[in-house]
Image (cartoon, grey):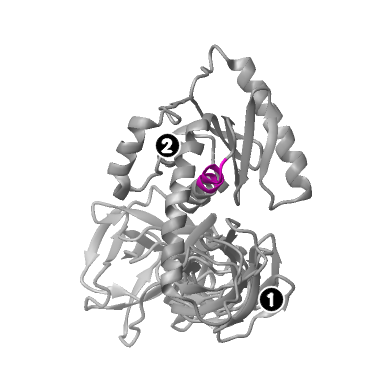
Amino acid sequence: MELQTDTAGILGYPIETNVAAAQSFSPTANFTATRIALYVQDSGKSDALAISVVPDVAGHPDTLTILATASNDTASAFAWANFTLTPSLAVTAGTTYWIVADDSAGTGEGYAWRYVSVDAYPRGNAATANGAVWTSQAGDFAFVVYGWTPAAVTISVIADRATVAGGDLLGYMIQLTNTGTEDATSVWINATLDSRLQFASAGPAPVTFAGGVVSFRPATLPAGTTYLYLNTTVRGLFQDNGSLVLPVTAEFFNGVAARSLSTAVTVGTHAPDVVATIASRKTEGDAGSMLTFEVTLRNRGSASAGHVWLNESLNPSLTYLNDTAVSPAALDGQRQSWHLTGVAPGTTQFNVTVQVDPLAAGDTVVANFLSVEFTDTGGTGLVRGRTNTVVFRVLGAFVDGGGGSNPWLWGSFVLSATVVGGTYLFFARRRLRTEEIFLIHHSGVLLVHMSKSMKADHDSDILSGMFTAIMSFVKDAFHYDGQQELQGLDLGKYRVHVRKGAITFLALVHTGKSTRWLLQTATRAVIAVESEYLDMLKDWNGDVRALTGVRDILKGYFLSPTGPSRSMQRLRATFSRFDQTFKGMRPL
């Protein structure tokens, strides 16, 4: 509004035929003028005073351009008289407008408009006219311009905490401030929840929740501030040092046009990140011996995990004995499960002790790993994973030695066995000739093929038939006994020895009589390959470049008379001069 309400003076300027008065005003804000009040007196006969609002031209009223008009028959004494404008007039801040009062009554029959001779309204001036000529006056007439401003709404959202973890309650306050004089109508406020936020409550009504969106429908937004609240629960939160964003939009009608607003608030997140590893100090041992697995559980996140489950299914050759975990294992046959709660960030370790089956066959290969599952702090959501895999080889049958033994006798035995065994190995290996090496995945996929004499481009039919026969025999034999070795398969002039590992088969095609050296070397080769590449082979994607290291291991065992040990280089060189059994093979 614009106004000058000093009416304490005694001056009144007459308004009658050919005599008019005007007062200018300049609004400080945009608004719509609807009514004007003047402090006037009906001086003579009762008649209506007409006023108009006109623009400014050169510091005086532009009476040729009428913006709005009004009239009122007022009282015979000075008083505030209201004039309702037709039409309502949208005025602009900083623009000068004039209120012009005029009456056609004769001399002494018109009106008087209260006037003060000082500058009571600095943003406007008074002016009078005799005829068409306007003269500026030093003071101001008394007036008030009434109106309204469109709804002017701002929006903000505040969360009741800066960071959250799973299970926390998270509240929001939505604040809408209307600085206009008119109510905002046709109001919609929508808050879109992150999938990790569960709706709890909101208000004031009416409120709806559908499709992850909370919608508020207040009838109006009056002048001032309106508050809305929204309560949620954080669930299934597994992103550590991440964020939850709540976007909020608003739509409304401000009295003139439709308007829209948007804002958002961000809250940081804390979450658990649980991993586990398993290790064993032994990679081989005797049947019947004790074996300890060291389990390391680590929460790499910044919040506690509500629940952690570790599950272990032992190989049939292993028997669970005990563990040192804080929570005792739940046992179900060969399966052990540990359930831990409130696992804080940091590292926890415990040991699991098992016994190797005393009747386990020598060179039996066993693998062990644990599956890992955990929830967020509030116990919601579930993340699954697994540890690395450890491999253990059984050396031989368990012997319960009763009483003492003679070291000299044992020394003589070892010396004699070495001489006899070495002589046998030398001559036996000269009769043995390995022709083909196949490393086959348990799924039936050929991983590596190395050949002494055949070429894939010339002997493809022979190699295909040989591989098909091996796979058929392997499937039949291992279907009934998962631990046996196959040595009796005949392929024409060739014989086949197959060694089964945790995830691979190693098939050796050879001529001559099978030897214990061949059986042991095959076992060691499978253990070496799976110890180094078990995880890669489990998820092999078909890239043959990843198998380069596997080929090198097989070369070390079967392309060298003494195996891959670097400490035996001189011995290998000596045997190589006399033994042509293992000439260099060509990998296909």
The circle drawn on residue 205 is: 1
Q: Nearer the viewer, residue 467 or 133?
A: 467
Query: Relative to 310, is 9 on the left or the right?
Result: left
Magenta stretch, residue numbers:
515-522
Give how far across and how far down residue 567 sits, in percent.
30, 50
Q: Secondary structure at mark 2?
A: helix
The amino acid type of the residue labelled 2 equals: Lys
Q: Nearer the viewer, residue 536 or 158?
A: 536
Residue 207 among magenta residues: no
Tell me what residue is drawn at x 49 percent, y 43 percent: 424
Viewer can see residue 562: yes
Q: Nearer the viewer, residue 283 or 136?
A: 283
- In the depicted structure, whether residue 388 falls above or below residue 356: above
Separation (CA) of disc 2 from disc 1 = 77 Å
Magenta region, mostly helix, strand or loop?
A: helix
The amino acid type of the residue labelled 1 equals: Ala
The quarter of the rendered structure image containing the N terminus is: bottom left
Query: Relative to 571, is 185 on the left or the right?
Result: right
Give how far across and how far down residue 483 sits, in percent.
69, 53
Tell me what residue is drawn at x 60 percent, y 76 percent: 400
Tell me what residue is drawn at x 63 percent, y 80 percent: 321
Crowding at dot 1, Cα within 10 Å, few <14 / some 14-19 / many 20+, comes out as: few
Marked residue nearer the N-terminal end (2 or 1): 1
The residue beneath circle 2 is 555
Q: Looking at the rendering, which quadrant does residue 106 occupy?
A: bottom left
Give how far across and how far down residue 179 sits, in percent.
45, 71
Give how far across and how far down residue 257 sits, in percent.
54, 54
Tell me whether the residue at label 2 lies in contact with that at label 1, contact meaning CB atoms closer than 8 angstroms: no
Q: Secondary structure at mark 1?
A: loop
